[in-house]
Image: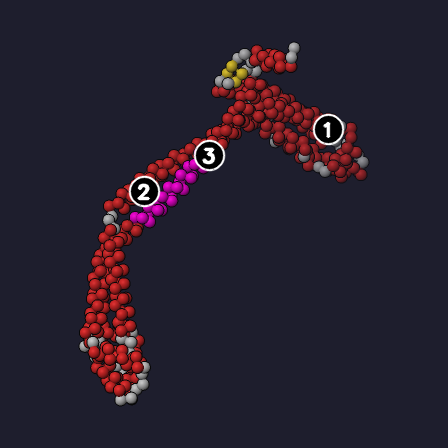
Amino acid sequence: MSLLSKIRNIFNEKDEELQEELLLDNALKQLNTKIENSKNEVLENTHRISTEIYSKLKDLHVLLSTLEKEDLEDKRGKASKDIKDRFCSVAKQQISSIENPEKDFDDVNKFLNDVSNTLNNLGGLTPKQMLHIKFFFAEQSRNIPKRTDEIRNLVNEARKEIEIHDAEYIKIKTLRYEIEEINTDIKEKSGAINDSENYLDNLRNRVEILSEELKKINTDSIETARKGLEEIEKRKRQSQQEADSYLDIERLIKKLKYEKKINDYILDAYVESPSKALIMDAELKIIDSIKEGLKLYNEDKIDIDKKKAEKAEEILNNPQKLKELRKNILDSEKELAEKEKELEKLLPLANKRKNIEKEKVFSEEALKKAENTIKSLKNEIAQLEKNKERLIIELKMSLSEKLNVNVV
């Protein structure tokens, strides 16, 4: 027979042994019944052992009472007698405090723990003090260690029954606990996904509403007004630059002011910024100042560059040019003020659009964050489902082995 055939035969034999098939839920119910029956059997045995222990504790109490009555003629042993009496008194009190357990797992476990603790600290003596008792009361106390050993053995026997019962099903209990923990975790994460999806729906609706509101706000007029404002500002700058270039008479004005000791704020302004001074000089008094300055120049009372003097002559001979320059600047300022008022009226609409755009960006960011959260939770659930599937397979195998059936 080939190796492959032998392997097939092994699995076929196993299949024949596990002819009965059980669903997982039914297998768990059957196991629970089996565990309960086993538990009842263990309880019956441990309670029987506990009753026997309780009986031996009574015997031990009698032995202690007998030892307690023993006396010594040798006065050297008085201290040992006191130790013995105290030991018997304390030990009897300890034993009397232990009650016979009810037929209940918790009660039996408590009883076994109490007995074990009592035996480990019986009478509250140190090893050296026990030696005193054994030396002076060896014969009278020899049955006490024997009886305590018997009780210890019975306690160990009962505990072993419980440990065997717990160990037999501990793996299945652990698997079921881990699966239940995963189910709880999946339920919580699924709830979080549902909440996040509701939040997502609200965000999507809000983004859609904001998008529609933005469509309704026509900002063409705002853009047109803004461009018009920029164009007017540009023309104003050009007019100012032209006036500053044309009124290049700074040195002439300075010489005139110095020679004539003139203190005039408009003349000061022509030195600093001719275009601004031109706006202030409504009566164009600068013409008289130029005329007076040229007179001083011609009389050699002031010294200026010939080209500057020729420029001054040009301005003096063409006062209409100054009027035009002044008018261009004033017209630009008037037009600029009107356009600023027009734009100011549109500002609430612009601010409204800005606020809507800001809220839309915030909502879109929150939307993306919520989507990432849901994606992460779904990945976590997928991993939990894989772990759960692995644990369920392991649980089915353990149940099949315990119940001798094929759990599917």
In-image side of 62 versus 329 (left or right)? right
Q: Which disc is residue 207 wearing?
A: 2
Q: Earlier in the sequence, mark 1 or mark 3?
A: 1
Could you tell me residue 319's position as x and y percent?
Answer: 20, 76
In-image side of 243 versus 374 (left or right)? left
Which residue is found at the position 18% from the left and 77% from the top? Answer: 283
When asked about the image quadrant of residue 348, the answer is: bottom left
Give the amino acid at mark 3: Asn
Callout count: 3
Which residue is found at the position 29% from the left and 72% from the top? Answer: 245
Report crowding for label 3: few under 14, some 14 to 19, many 20 or more residues within 10 A (C-alpha): few
Whether residue 188 is visible to the viewer of this picture, yes or no, is no
Check contact, mark 2 vs mark 1: CB within 8 A: no
**Vertical side of 403 occupied by 108: above or below:** below
The residue beneath circle 3 is 379
Which of 13 and 286 lies nearest the eye of the viewer?
286
SS at mark 3 in the image: helix
The dominant secondary structure in magenta is helix
Magenta stretch contains residue 358: yes
Which residue is found at the position 38% from the left and 44% from the top? Answer: 365
When asked about the image quadrant of residue 159, the answer is: top right
Location of the N terminus by quadrant is top right
SS at mark 2 in the image: helix
For marks 2 and 3, give the CA distance: 27 Å
Could you tell me residue 402's position as x and y percent?
Answer: 57, 19
Q: Report the coloring of the rendering.
A: secondary structure
Which of 261 and 134 lies nearest the eye of the viewer?
261
The residue beneath circle 1 is 145
Could you tell me residue 222's position as x and y percent?
Answer: 25, 54
Task: Please give the range of residues in magenta.
Answer: 356-380
